[in-house]
Image (cartoon, rainbow, N blue to C red):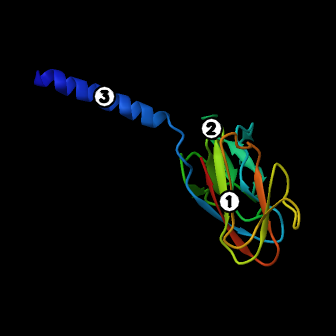
Amino acid sequence: MKKRILILLALLSVGVLAFAASRNYPTEPASFDIGTDSLMIMAPRLVSAKDWDATTAYSHGDMCRNTNRHNLTYWNVSGTTNGSLSATMPSHLGGDVADGGTNVWRRIPPRERLGFAVVNQGSNAIWIAVGHDAVVNSGIYLLSGGSYWVDNNAMQDAVYAISSAATNTAGTQEW
């Protein structure tokens, strides 16, 4: 009887773990310094990125995929215009990783975006746009401390932000 109960508990544990692994958990929260130029704060999902190339100068917003494992796609979250060569091909599974040069790469999850949130963590107003550059006084307007979120059927395009003045901070979360 004890063996049957132990086997049943083991099978139940495997089922729970398999179910948990199949769920779409949120990405790591991120924070971006937003200036008076439009900045991509969330990469598009389900993208067709080009293979990483050691001779290419990458800048913020560029995307590439690992040439050995095509299911690993990365987004350059470095400063806006560094345009520097990438010393090493990105291959990490999570978080932000510098490539040995001035590029910082973030992995793009290989699944559809279900929802996202943007929070204005600065003292100046920001505007956000989906699918195109953000423009001051146009689009989704967030005062200091304001937030915008979309749940279920979220857009898969890139999300951009721009500040009304100086430097502001925007926090993001995707699920």
Q: Amino acid at mark 1?
A: Val
Disc 2 on helix, strand or loop?
A: loop
Please give left or right for residue 5 compared with residue 71 in the image.
Answer: left
Residue at 36 percent of width and 28 percent of height: 15
Q: Is any atom of residue 138 visible in this view? A: yes
Q: Position of residue 127 (x, y in %)?
A: 80, 64
In this rendering, which labeled residue sits more in front, label 2 or label 3?
A: 3
* Residue 14 vertical position relative to residue 135 in the rendered view, above or below: above
Packing grade of label 3 (10 A; few <14, some 14-19, many >=20) is few
Q: Which residue is mark 2?
A: 110
What distance separates the C-alpha of mark 3 from that of mark 1?
38 Å
Q: Which mark is residue 12?
A: 3
State the quadrant of the N terminus: top left
Rendering quarter of residue 81: bottom right
What distance separates the C-alpha of mark 2 from that of mark 3?
28 Å
Residue at 83 percent of width and 71 percent of height: 36
Q: Position of residue 146 (x, y in %)?
A: 69, 67
Residue at 73 percent of width and 45 percent of height: 44
Q: Position of residue 80 (x, y in %)?
A: 77, 64
Q: Which residue is mark 1?
A: 118
Nearer-the-camera pick, 158 or 68: 158
Q: Amino acid at mark 2?
A: Pro
Residue at the left extreme of this rendering: 1
